[in-house]
Image (cartoon, rainbow, N blue to C red):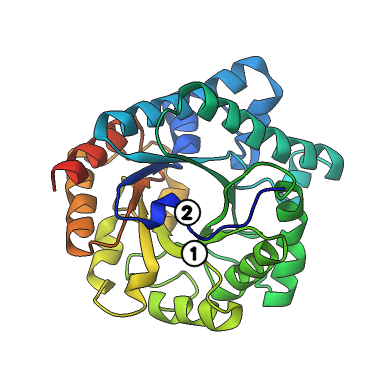
Amino acid sequence: MARYRQDLPQMEDGLFLTYVGMETDLIFTQGIDLPGFASYPLLDTEDGRALLEGYYRAVIETAREAGAGVILESPTWVANRDRATQIGYGAERLAGINKAAIAHMQQARDRFGDLPTVLSANIGPRDDAYAPSDRMSPEQADAYHAEQIAVLSETDVDVISGYTLAYPEEAIGIARAARRYDLPVVISFTVETDGRLPTGATLEDAIGTVDAATGSHPAYYMINCAHPDHFESVLEEGSWMQRIRGLVANASRSSHAELDAAEVLDAGDPAELGRQLAGLRQRFGHISVLGGCCGTDMRHIACIASRARSA
């Protein structure tokens, strides 16, 4: 079992890079079919494992060139019961693939990671991240996500990262389950073009609600799956803002609805995205984690790293 710790290295002042845009890159750029938007089936084949390792190696090398640390994210964002069942993974097979994801990531760290490298178990929402139709209570979310977190607790993962969350009750459940299994947790909310969560809550209210219900268990919070234009105007000095340490941005300025309907990839402007994220890190000096989400590739990560290093 992973040892519990809240003193994660990315909570210091140095820059850490992360990347969670692999699925859109695989689908739109490389023409690889990912049923259910799931990348973890790649672990079932030699070619698939090589693809995943290529992403890990690329982000590690980019971080090394920038003098930064790196957070490797496992391909397990939709490796939960409901979504796995839809593509033919039963409980036993699903547990095995979650464990295999962390082991494969650990091998990449051992092979390439001669710099601070954190293994993050990436878990996502039970329902549609952008328009959840069946919102859970904190108790329901705890019971549901504990299935995946219990399996991950048997690996050498460093942190649980709940990504693309749309409402605080699900985040509370994830945080409570992680605490029960002695694992640190990061909570990452997504926002719409108005800077609010898809369910209408403000970031300030969502973070305050989760902290109040969990004894501030999350190590920190992040924003992901949104362009900086969508959230930079709502970021302000305050105690709640001090809890946000990561920004993992989309390349596109499109709304979630527009992205869902898109038939071609909007890769945006990598240099501009790098400037915007570096500017936000300069404005809020405690932000230590920067990265790319939907529509990004290693060009974006390199620009983010270069701009943040020189900011």
The image position of residue 90, as x and y in percent, is 84, 42
Q: Are marks 1 and 2 in contact (CB under 8 Å)?
A: yes
Which residue matches tag 2? Answer: 8
Q: Residue at x 68, y 45 (%)?
A: 79
Judged left or right of residue 114, residue 86 is right
Occupied quadrant, residue 108: top right
Residue type (three-letter) at the residue carrying disc 1: Ala
The image position of residue 192, as x and y in percent, is 38, 65
Q: Residue at x 33, y 71 (%)?
A: 242
The image position of residue 171, as x and y in percent, is 58, 68
Spatial separation of the CA atoms under disc 1 and disc 2: 8 Å
Query: Which residue of the protein is positioned furthest toward the top in this rendering?
Result: 46
Mark 1 or 2 closer to N-term?
2
The image position of residue 46, as x and y in percent, is 65, 15
Camera-side residue of 248 and 132: 248
Which residue matches tag 1? Answer: 219
Q: Residue at x 56, y 60 (%)?
A: 185
Element assignment for label 1: loop
Q: Is residue 158 visible?
A: yes
Q: Nearer the viewer, mark 1 or mark 2?
A: 2
